[in-house]
Amino acid sequence: MNSSVKKLLLVAVAVVICFIPHLGSAAPPDDDATCDISVTVDSIMEWAGNFTAIVLANMTSQAATPSDNETQTIYANCNFDISADNTIASELNSATDELVTKYLLDDDGDGSIATGATPGDKLASDIITWTDYDSFLSTPLVITHVDADGAVQITLSVQASNLPGNVADSGAYSAQQTLTASWISD
């Protein structure tokens, strides 16, 4: 072989080695690094927000009993109870008169399969019938948390009526009901 062919072969081999550096060698094995991660979730019990205002239909007769409701969510991973304001603030009043004001409460769970009140707890809190404002939830409603169900829908209903044998003064009446959720246990 003449020297120019040898030089050309040498250059060709150098080019191949330069452009394919791992030719003939195995790739190094993968190497993993791990990181343990943890977080603690505290007991949580919080309303998603305030209820939307309830505006009852106008009372147009002595026998009228308008009612309506609104629903709000409580996020929770613990057992808690709900109590109500039983003061005059929760009674429908005007500047000169008051209306018979009654409440109901309901939830979308059963305390067994889904977070909510058991039938026995609903009965004990007397929320299954219309209850006068001054005794509504005088026994707080127990809500039992069910694992993997971290929310319960609470429906507040209100009803207005005239006193028997009476018609309330004309005008606007208002009230504000406050429901308080209180932690019981995890």
Image (cartoon, rainbow, N blue to C red):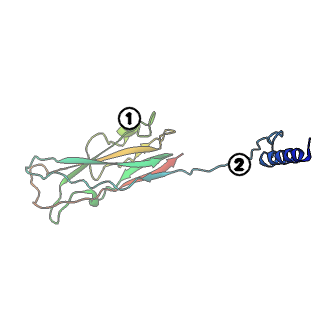
Taking depth in this image into account, of 181 and 46 the one nearest to the observer is 46
Residue that badge 2 annotates: 35
Residue type of the residue flagged with mark 2: Cys
Residue that badge 1 annotates: 119
Residue furthest front in the image? 2
Position of residue 160 measured from the top left corner of the image (x, y, whole percent): 19, 50
Residue 98's disc number: none
Residue type of the residue flagged with mark 1: Pro
Q: Residues within 10 Å of mark 2 (few under 14, many from 20)?
A: few
Q: How many marks?
A: 2
The numbered mark, 1 or 2, whose residue comes first in the sequence reads: 2
Taking depth in this image into account, of 9 and 102 the one nearest to the observer is 9
Judge left or right: residue 172 versus residue 85.
left
Judge left or right: residue 134 versus residue 36.
left
Taking depth in this image into account, of 95 and 41 the one nearest to the observer is 41
Residue at 43%, 43% (x, y): give it.
Answer: 143
Position of residue 27 measured from the top left corner of the image (x, y, whole percent): 79, 41
Give the quadrant of the N terminus.
Answer: top right
Dot 2 falls on a residue whose secondary structure is: loop
How far apart marks 1 and 2 lie (CA) works out to 46 Å
Position of residue 63 measured from the top left corner of the image (x, y, whole percent): 10, 46
Residue at 30%, 59% (x, y): give it.
Answer: 87
